[in-house]
Image (tube, rainbow, N blue to C red):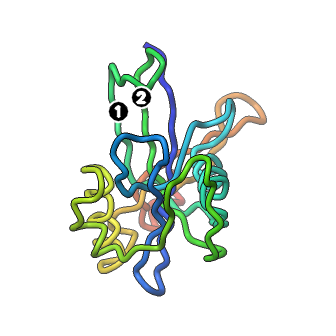
Amino acid sequence: MPYLCKNTGAVVDESNGKVLVVQDKNKTVNAWKFPGGLSDPGENVGTTAVREVFEETGVRSEFKSLLSIRQQHNHPGAFGMSDMYIICRLSPLTHDINFCTQECLRCEWLELTELAKTHATTPITSRLASLLLHGLNQGFDKIDLAMEELPAVYSGRFYQLYHRELPQVLKHKA
């Protein structure tokens, strides 16, 4: 079964422990979630997350890592395809919110501690907020899947490999 790929950006401000969240305008439940949307053909996951965050919130950000992937089949909103939902950790470059009123009901910077325990969110958002809190407190190297671009076997081509950070000694052997 083909996959529909949706990417979302958890934009974390490490200086104050806040994360950027939205409430979708067209959902039956107005739960807090991370901004995101569908990838364009040929678009990398981090690029999609950065673009979607900007389109929905007006906040500019940069890709830091891959955090998590949700795989789901028979999702009613996936046009008959299986659904891959890729959550990226982003860092804010700007903080002023100018959200898209056609897509979003609300947009705010919320405390990660509040997002992790609120009932006004989805289970995946709550779980990811707890994961981000762990990264904020213990170091993001404990949770991040960093991206490394490597040469493909096809001449002149490259691919992105996401994995936990290797010790420097092992990087040179790979």
Pointers 1 and 2 in contact (CB under 8 A)?
yes
Is tag 1's residue or tag 2's residue first in the polypeptide sequence?
1
Residue 15 as seen in the image, left or right of residue 133 = right
Q: In x, y percent, where is residue 80?
A: 44, 14
Which numbered circle lies on residue 83?
A: 2
Identify the residue shown where x is 48% and y is 70%. Answer: 108
Along the viewing direction, whichever of 91 and 29 lies nearer the viewer = 29
Quadrant of res 19: bottom left
Name the residue tied to disc 1. 71
Badge 2 crowding class, 10 Å Cα cut-off, few under 14, some 14 to 19, many 20 or more, is many
Quarter of the image with the N terminus in it:
top left
Identify the residue shown where x is 67% and y is 39%. Answer: 43
Residue 49 as seen in the image, left or right of residue 32 = right
Pick out the residue farthest to the right.
Answer: 156
Q: Amino acid at mark 2?
A: Asp
Which numbered circle lies on residue 159?
A: none
Identify the residue shown where x is 48% and y is 86%. Answer: 15
Judging from the image, what secondary structure is the residue with disc 2 in?
Answer: strand
Identify the residue shown where x is 28% and y is 75%. Answer: 113
Q: CA distance from mark 1 to mark 2?
A: 6 Å
